[in-house]
Image (cartoon, rainbow, N blue to C red):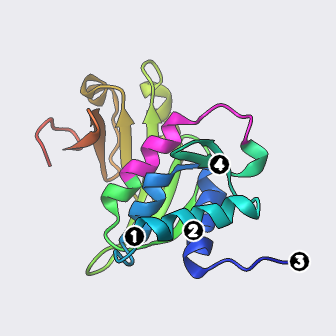
Amino acid sequence: MKFMTTPEQDYILSILKSTKIMRKSQAIKLLNKLDSRRNELFWERFFGQLGHIRKIAWLSDDLFTVPFMQRSPVDQDMLQAIDIMLDLTEKKIHALSSSTPPYKLCFLAEQKQDFGSYAIIAVRHGVEAAITAALRDSGQDGRTIVFLLSDISQATCIKTPLPHFFAVTDGNKYRYFSGGRHDMQ
């Protein structure tokens, strides 16, 4: 017996296909950008159906993955990249890929007036020079790069002429800094 999914479930599954992991709260935020008139009962049924038809596998109350990745370690960089994607998206994600290194996540986000194309790079201490070299070898494709830093001191080690800014965690939110400066954007 084939189970049908709703357009909203298909949207979340299309994103999960690239990210492989997502928080329930992140999925709800993505869908609320499209239509915020949902209640708790809707969400219970929404995720319950996806779990029942084995489209998702739960790792905790708020964390799910694709079933074949159920035993894999949790990709914290991807979860942070999704948070940043949520911050940069006003309406809907139109294209998404977990791209090849150095990119963690690339996406095309619908804004109120137009679209924004972004590439997120998670930067660990000590790899700043390697990332700068990798970017030098890649072509410019019109995306704005978001460097997800462990701390803002890493920003001085990253040199690129490509449009970019930096993101640093600040508790449960992110602070964003324009490229080359340490003032709030």
Q: Amino acid at mark 2?
A: Phe
Would you name the residue on which mark 2 appears? 46
Residue 84, given in percent of the width and then of the height, sits at: 37, 50
Discs 1/4, front:
1
* Marks 2 and 4, how far apart at CA: 15 Å
Residue 79, given in percent of the width and then of the height, sits at: 48, 43
Task: Please report contact status of discs 1 and 3: CB closer than 8 Å, yes or no.
Answer: no
Q: Earlier in the sequence, mark 1 or mark 4?
A: 1
Magenta: main secondary structure equals helix
Q: Amino acid at mark 1?
A: Asn
* Marks 1 and 3, how far apart at CA: 29 Å
Q: Amino acid at mark 3?
A: Met
Give the answer, above or below, for where 39 lies relative to 73.
Answer: below
Examine the structure image and report whether residue 174 is included in the region drawn in magenta. Answer: no
Q: Residue furthest top?
A: 126
Would you name the residue on which mark 4 appears? 65
Please name whichever residue, 58 or 82, is drawn nearer the observer in this view of the structure: 58
Q: Secondary structure at mark 3?
A: loop
Q: Secondary structure at mark 4?
A: strand
Please name whichever residue, 33 or 51, is drawn nearer the observer in this view of the structure: 51
Give the answer, above or below, for where 110 lies relative to 105.
Answer: below
Q: Secondary structure at mark 1?
A: loop
Please name whichever residue, 75 or 1, is drawn nearer the observer in this view of the structure: 1
Q: Earlier in the sequence, mark 4 or mark 3?
A: 3
Q: Earlier in the sequence, mark 2 or mark 4?
A: 2
- Dividing the picture into quadrants, the one containing residue 5 is bottom right
Of the 4 image quadrants, the one containing the N terminus is: bottom right
Q: Which span of residues is magenta-colored?
A: 70-84
Would you name the residue on which mark 3 appears? 1
Image disc number at residue 39: 1
Image disc number at residue 87: none
Discs 4/3, front:
3
